[in-house]
Amino acid sequence: MLANKSFLTNLISAIAFGIAYLMPEFVGRHALMMASLFALSGALTNWLAVYMLFERIPGLYGSGIIALRFGQFKESIRILIMENFFTEENFVKVTQGALPHTIQPELIMDKIDFDKMFGGFVTVIKDSSFGGMFKLFGGEKALEPLRNPFKTEFERQASEILSNIDIASVLRKETDFGTFKSKISAMVDTTLNELTPQRVKEIVENMMRTHLGWLVVWGGVFGALIGFVSAVFF
C-alpha cells in the first residue's frame, strides 16, 4: 500500500515535470514546472525519510533508527505493559470481575459427610469429662435421635456462613500483588528478550508503514503548492 502511494505520487510528479520541461513555451508552463518539481522533491524527501526509519543507509546518520534503537523500543513496550495494564487498581478490577464473590453452599453441602461429622461430635462428648455421665444415660444410642436434627441445623448454619463469605475479597488479600507483578514482569522480560532487531523492525513496520505512505502523498501535495506559489509570486 505504501509502495503504491509513494510510486504513484512520485510518478505523477515526474510526468508533470517532464511534460512542462520538454514542451514548448505555453501559458503556465513555468508554474507547472515549478509545482511539479517541488512536488517531486517533497514526495521523494518524505519517501526517503520513511525508508530511513526502517532501513540502514551507509553514510546517512540516523538511518535505520528503528533497528538501532530496538533496546529502547523493547523497554518502552515493557513500561507500557507493566505501568498501564498490570497496576494494582487493574488487578483488583480483574479479580472482582473474574472471581466469584459468593460461594454456592449447595455445591459444598453435597460433599460433606454429615454422618461422619455427627460421629465426631459423639466421640468428643464420649471422650470429654462428661463421658461417664454420657454412658450412664445410654451412651451413643441416647444421642442417635439427634442425628437428623444435627445434620439439618449444621447444614443451615454452614450455608448461612458460606453465603456471607466474599471469596474474591479473601483471595485478593491472600494474593500478594507485589509477587504477582514480579512474576508477570519476569514473563514479559523473557518474551521481550526473544525479540531481535529485525523482529522489532518488522513489528513497527507493520504498524506504521501503511499510514506513513500518506506522508509521501502530502509531501507531494504541499510541495506542489509551494512550487506554484513560488512561480506565481516570486
Image (cartoon, rainbow, N blue to C red):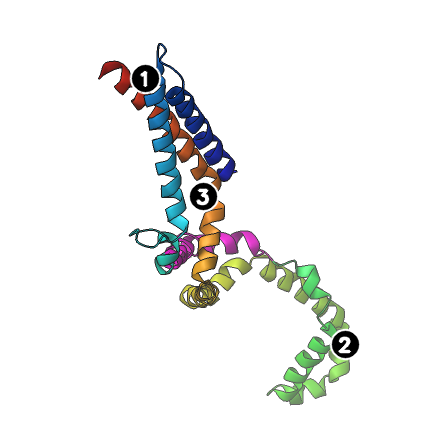
SS at circle 2: helix
Between marks 2 and 3, how big is the CA–CA gap?
A: 79 Å
Between marks 3 and 1, how big is the CA–CA gap?
A: 37 Å
State the residue position of label 2: 144
36 or 109: which is nearer to us?
A: 36
Which is nearer the N-term, disc 3 or disc 1? 1
Task: Give the amino acid at mark 3.
Answer: Met
Residue at horizontal 35 percent and vertical 15 percent from the top = 29
Q: Between tags 1 and 2, which lies in front? A: 1
Residue at horizontal 77 percent and vertical 81 percent from the top = 141
| Quadrant in the rendering for residue 86 | bottom left
Q: Does residue 105 show up magenta in the picture?
A: no
Q: Is residue 139 above or below residue 100?
A: below
Decide if residue 78 is on the left or right side of residue 159. left
Look at the image and tell me in which quarter the C terminus lies: top left
| Quadrant in the rendering for residue 50 | top left
Residue at horizontal 40 percent and vertical 45 percent from the top = 51
**Proximity of marks 3 and 1: CB atoms separated by less than 8 Å:** no
